Image (cartoon, rainbow, N blue to C red):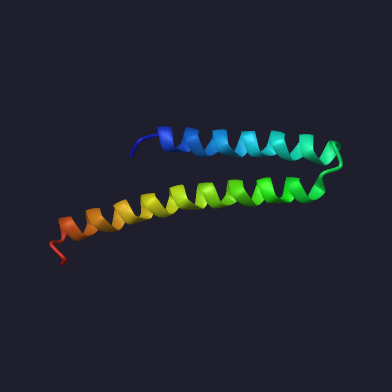
């Protein structure tokens, strides 16, 4: 497993946290919530892709079709 995916997820988290704080300080609570939600969706899609790769590897190892 590559460690770069962990760094990508951490980078998205840091970026979203900074954007969230900037938008909250500017009085844009709705936009801050939407950026947080978008960040969660992006990370969730990354994790779903990893789980898909895991299941494909398991299928090929045990020859399940």
Tell whether 55 sits left or right of 61. Answer: right
Between residue 47 and residue 30, name the one nearer to us: 30
Q: In this view, does 65 lie to the left or right of 36?
A: left
Most extreme residue toward the left, as rendered? Answer: 63
Residue sitting at x 48%, y 35%: 8
Which residue lies most toward the bottom here?
A: 65
| Occupied quadrant, residue 55 | bottom left
Identify the residue at image location x=44%, y=47%: 46
Picture quarter containing residue 5?
top left
Identity of the residue drawn at 52% across and 47% down: 43
In this rendering, position of residue 55 left or right of residue 16: left
Across and down, in percent, residue 21 comes to 77, 37
38 is higher (above) or lower (below) than 64: above
Left or right, 52 with respect to 60, comes to: right
Q: Position of residue 52 (x, y in %)?
A: 33, 56
Q: Please tell me which residue lies in front, 65 or 45.
A: 45
Between residues 35 and 61, which one lies in front from this camera angle?
35
Residue 9, image x, y percentages: 51, 39
């Amino acid at each position: 497993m590559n460690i770069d995916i962990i760094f990508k997820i951490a980078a998205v988290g840091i970026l979203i946290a900074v954007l969230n704080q900037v938008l909250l300080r500017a009085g844009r609570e709705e936009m801050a919530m939407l950026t947080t939600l978008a960040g969660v969706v992006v990370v969730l899609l990354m994790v779903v892709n990893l789980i898909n790769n895991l299941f494909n590897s398991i299928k090929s190892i045990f020859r399940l079709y």
